[in-house]
Image: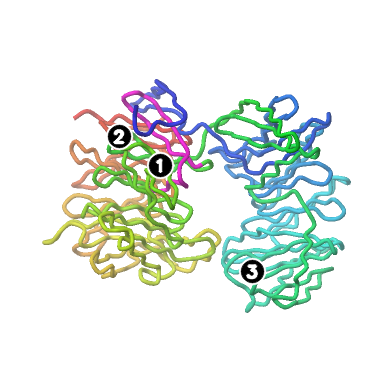
Amino acid sequence: MSALALAESARGASKDLGNGFRDHGVAAPISQHRGLVATVDGEGHNVVLLWLMDHRGGYALLLLDATTGKVEQFPMPFDQDGDSPYASILSSANKFYTHYGNHFVEFDPVKRAFTFHKKTSPQMAMSMTEDDQGTIWSVTFPQSGVASYNPKTGAFRDYGHVYKQDWKEYPRHIAADDAGWVYFGVGMTNSQIVSLDPATGKGTPVLEEGERKKGVGYVYRDLDGKVYGQAVQDKESNWYELHKGVARKLGAGEHTSSKPKPFIAGSQTLSHTTFPDGTRAAQIDLTDRRFVVEDPKTKKRQEYSFEYTSEGAIVMGAAASPDGTILGGTAFPMRCFRYDPKADAITNRAAFGQWNTTAVQRDHFIVGGYPGGFILDYDPAKPWVHTEKTKPGNPQWLTDSHDVHRPTVLLPHPDGHTVILAGTPNYGFTGGGMLFWDRDKPAKDARTLLTDAQLIPDQSTESLVALPATGGAAGEKLLGGTTTTPGSGGQKKAKLAELYVMDFASRKIDWRAPLMPGVQEYTALWPGPRGLIYGIADARLFFVFDPATRTIAHQQDVGEKFGPVVHDQGPRPFVNDKRDGQTYLLCRNGVTRIDDTSFEITLVAKSPIPLQTGGDYLDGRIYFVSGSHLCSFELPSK
């Protein structure tokens, strides 16, 4: 058995799709909950309600009956358009609410049915609360859209976007005072607390500009009927007392008696597992399909197995491993999958984080992941040992940095021992850094971090390639391409993406320029013929860069003819046939080939399924991702 002996396996599952394409199956046929509550139904049965998410988004509500062990699955009553819950609340009237995909929705466990839904201004709630009259309130990403619903009267109001900024807002806290006024805290670029008059719908910022901080404004409802808030939740920020729309500033240490009003509400990680009678859901495992109920007084446990439908987790990409298999990672849940072409078996197991980017150096498989911009080093010839930051493992955790919070590119340097990770920064920040790790050095000496200030301020490196040797060793110079996209919730500041040349030894930039008009992202870079570099800009513009003259030698829009190039946080659109060095480009509609002389791009095969992200070569086939499935295309024989 392989060193990567994984949890689930499907043998002989590949399907011939025609035209050289094969579907090898779902990489990880598992969903993740996006909010979970324990409550009771109309017959007094203890039930668990949870929102199910797979690669399509939040597609259903799952009801687990703790009395009978039976399960019911309820499809969402609207098109979620790929979106998922980020907040939910179980009301005092025992109804479960969420708001996403531009829809506010109510599920009644007593009726075991969706009982209300309504389309709203975009997009999804980041926080929800209930006021003293039983009205449910939500405030949404990306521009503070507010909605309210009174289940007693059926009155629903969409207030629209009440506080706009030039960056995408995360309104992670909301509260209502005993007079019905609503207050919410936003972030991430610059915190704020907004006071909403429920009658007029006017939103008024509370914090003065000088008080705003990097992070999210914080508010909570106190048992005294008032709402209290800070610029961010810390010891240094001033407190505000908020009541009837009036904000009274308190000192940082003046609000010392906090008595929050309890709500069963929270983010996408909400997990309320205690039933009204005191028993609890001790375990709800969507991977192993196990449901365990425990009485904390008697310690008596009841275990059920259950089933639910899932189309599988989001797949971040796929790459060939040194052991002759295909490895990759999924998101929500975070899993590692392995496809063995000889056994035609795809398997998966729990992974450390989200595997955004992957690469091979020598006989090791390297991973760059989210969150936190971590690097893992996996030796596929040795047994798998689950990764922990502070312990030996395989994959072994090496380092991380929030300057590369969401990696987009991982480059194994031609020196054979340095790996370079780059991407966008932490939430609320704008420019991303670059992380170097020398695998041959002791850990204390292996790491070098460059911030965006040392690279290109207010931009992040999206793509990176080692330039061929020009009298010295390959990789003495690196070519990077940036993106103007900030970290999640950050503010876009740069107007044009740039290409740059870096000296590898000094880590200094020799040259930089926004060569292509209007371009916001250099999606990918790849070694081409005769010392040239192939590239993709804005996921659709193919170009050829000449390092000698530092000019664009060729450019064409492939999106018009073949669909956009495959794209994700680590896209891998270029693939080389290792038999002859021919370069292929993966586009949404099929596999294309680049003529190394004329640079003409021709369609090799139109795909019966959309190509989503790449992509690697193994034994005459190009592997890629479509939806939650690992697929491949058989290249013409040589």
Q: CA distance from mark 3 to mark 1?
A: 38 Å
The residue indicated by pointer 3 is 234
Judging depth in this view, the residue of 106 and 36 nearest the camera is 36
Around disc 1, counting alpha carbons within 10 Å, would you say few (fewer than 14), some (14 to 19), or many (20 or more)? many
What is the x, y in percent for residue 334? 49, 42
- Amino acid, disc 1: Gly
Quadrant where the C terminus is found in the figure? top left
> Is 339 within the magenta?
yes
Q: Nearer the viewer, mark 3 or mark 2?
A: 3
Q: Is residue 564 left or right of residue 177?
A: left
- Amino acid, disc 2: Val
Tell me the quarter of the picture where residue 190 sits. Answer: bottom right
The residue indicated by pointer 2 is 604
Q: Are marks 3 and 2 in contact (CB under 8 Å)?
A: no
Tell me the quarter of the picture where residue 605 sits. Answer: top left
**Tag shown at residue 317:** 1
Q: Are marks 3 and 1 in contact (CB under 8 Å)?
A: no
Around disc 2, counting alpha carbons within 10 Å, would you say few (fewer than 14), some (14 to 19), or many (20 or more)? some
Magenta range is 334-357
Residue appearing at x 27%, y 58% in the figure: 441
Judging depth in this view, the residue of 343 and 485 nearest the camera is 343
Residue appearing at x 36%, y 65% in the figure: 449
Q: CA distance from mark 2 to mark 1?
A: 22 Å
Q: Earlier in the sequence, mark 2 or mark 1?
A: 1
Residue appearing at x 43%, y 52% in the figure: 390
